[in-house]
Image (cartoon, rainbow, N blue to C red):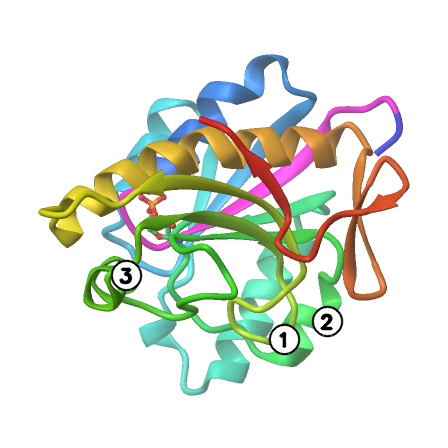
Amino acid sequence: MGDQQCCVVVLISGNGNNLQALIDASSNSGYTISHVISNNPDAFGLERAQRCGIASTVLNHRDFGTRGEFDSALQQAIDDQNPDLVVLAGFMRILGPEFVKNFSGRMLNIHPSLLPKYPGINTHQRVLDAGDREHGATVHFVTEELDGGPLIAQGRILVNANDTAQELAARVLIREQQLYPTVVTWFASGRLSLQQDRAVMDGAALPREGLQIDS
Ligand code: GRF
């Protein structure tokens, strides 16, 4: 990466709220989003990219016979951009271990829970069902384990007694939009890396639960 801008490719499947936050923060953060790839041709995030003059590619997973064929096409599309960092931002496909290994240490994901609690989907309702007092979002390095890679940072919210899953999702999203640009900026400046199975910042291993970022 050197003194060049960190080249980032963002993968989306849906609305692209996280993509938008990353775009909005990119002007003075040391990174440039060079390309957006979506598995969903109808993702509103494609509209966001287009409005901001960012090139995009649609790889509709329904056009591929197997997960492996999709992963191979996706890897080629990413390699064509030769990015320093791949960012999953609302990307809803499970990526195979071969694919993930190729991007070890340079692929991030954001997940709407305080990992390791609630990997997978429907996190907000699961928090309500469990009666948790806290909830939030986590940014982590992507490894073969779904939502299981080394944690980098978390943003927390308090759960109110009469919250609905939708209200939680809206408040978590606000934290996500603060958290992701912060972490991508750390990576772009060379402060953040994956070493063995730990996220490392400024040469020191981060806590297992990641850095806790205040709102
Ligand atoms: C967000 O909750 C994010 O945590 C998860 O996907 C959801 C939608 O993201 N990864 P976006 O609005 O498409 O960025």
Q: Which mark is residue 214?
A: none
Q: Which element carries disc 2, helix, strand or loop?
A: helix
Q: Earlier in the sequence, mark 2 or mark 1?
A: 2
Q: Is residue 9 visible?
A: yes
In screen coordinates, is 4 left or right of 125? Answer: right
Front-most of 115 and 67?
115
Query: In which quadrant is the C terminus drawn?
Result: top left
Front-most of 204 and 121?
204
Q: Which element carries disc 3, helix, strand or loop?
A: helix
**Residue plotted at (16% across, 42% down):** 167
User: Could you tell me the amino acid type at mark 1?
Assistant: Glu
Tag 2 and tag 1, C-beta contact below 8 Å: yes
Residue on which disc 3 sits? 127
In screen coordinates, is 71 left or right of 117? Answer: right
Q: Which mark is residue 101?
A: 2
Residue on which disc 1 sits? 144
Graded by Cα atoms within 10 Å as few (under 14), some (14 to 19) or many (20 or more), the crowding at tag 2 reads few
Work out how far the residue at label 1 is from the one at label 3, CA to CA, in angstroms.
25 Å
Q: Earlier in the sequence, mark 1 or mark 3?
A: 3
Work out how far the residue at label 2 is from the one at label 1, CA to CA, in angstroms.
7 Å
* Region of the chain picked out in magenta, as a range: 3-16
Tell us which disc is closer to us: 1 or 3.
Answer: 3
Q: Which element carries disc 1, helix, strand or loop?
A: loop
Tell us which disc is closer to us: 2 or 1.
Answer: 1
Front-most of 17 and 207?
207
